[in-house]
Image (spheres, grey):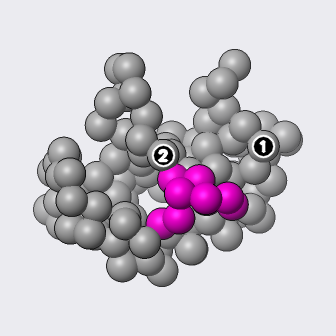
Amino acid sequence: MKLSYKNKKLEKVCKVERAAERELPTGLHVKKLFQRLSELAAFNCLNEVPTTPPFRRHKLGGERINEWAITIKNGWRLCFSAVSDAGEPIQEPDLQKITSIKIDAIEDYHD
C-alpha cells in the first residue's frame, strides 16, 4: 500500500528512528512501530491487513468514523484513513479497492 502522512512532523517520526525515539513516549516500542509501517507498505490493499493479532485492523467510531487502526504494542495504535492515490479522503466500503492510506496518529486512545 502507498503510505502518506498527516503532516511533515508525523512523517519524520515514522521514517527516522531517532526522531521517533525523541517524540514518542518511552512506553511505545519504536522498533515495533517501524515493523508495522513496513508491513503495512507491503500489503496490496486494506483488505489484506489481518483483523486478528498482531495487527488487529479495526474501524474506529464516534468522531473518528472514517479512520482505521492497527495495534503497535499494548494499547498503542497506528491510526490512519483511506485516501485516493491523489491523497483525497475516501469512504470506500470495498476494502480491496483501498490501496493508499494516510497515517493520522500514533497514540493510545484508550486513556
Q: Residue at x 43, y 34 (%)?
A: 60
| Mark 1, secondary structure of its residue | loop
State whether residue 15 is above or below residue 25.
Answer: below
Magenta stretch bounds: 49-57
User: What secondary structure characterizes most of the magenta part?
Assistant: loop
* Residue at the spot of label 2: 58
Name the side, left or right, on which 53 lies relative to 37. Answer: right
**Which image quadrant for residue 87?**
bottom left
For the N terminus, which image quadrant? bottom left
Return the residue found at the far right: 26
- Disc 1 to disc 2, how far (Cα)? 15 Å
Name the side, left or right, on which 13 lies relative to 75. Answer: left
Check disc 1 and give the amino acid type. Asn
Q: Residue at x 75, y 57 (%)?
A: 30
Check disc 2 and give the amino acid type. His
Q: Residue at x 30, y 37 (%)?
A: 66
Q: Nearer the viewer, residue 96 or 81?
A: 96
**Res. 15 mark:** none
Q: Earlier in the sequence, mark 1 or mark 2?
A: 2
- Magenta residue check for 100: no
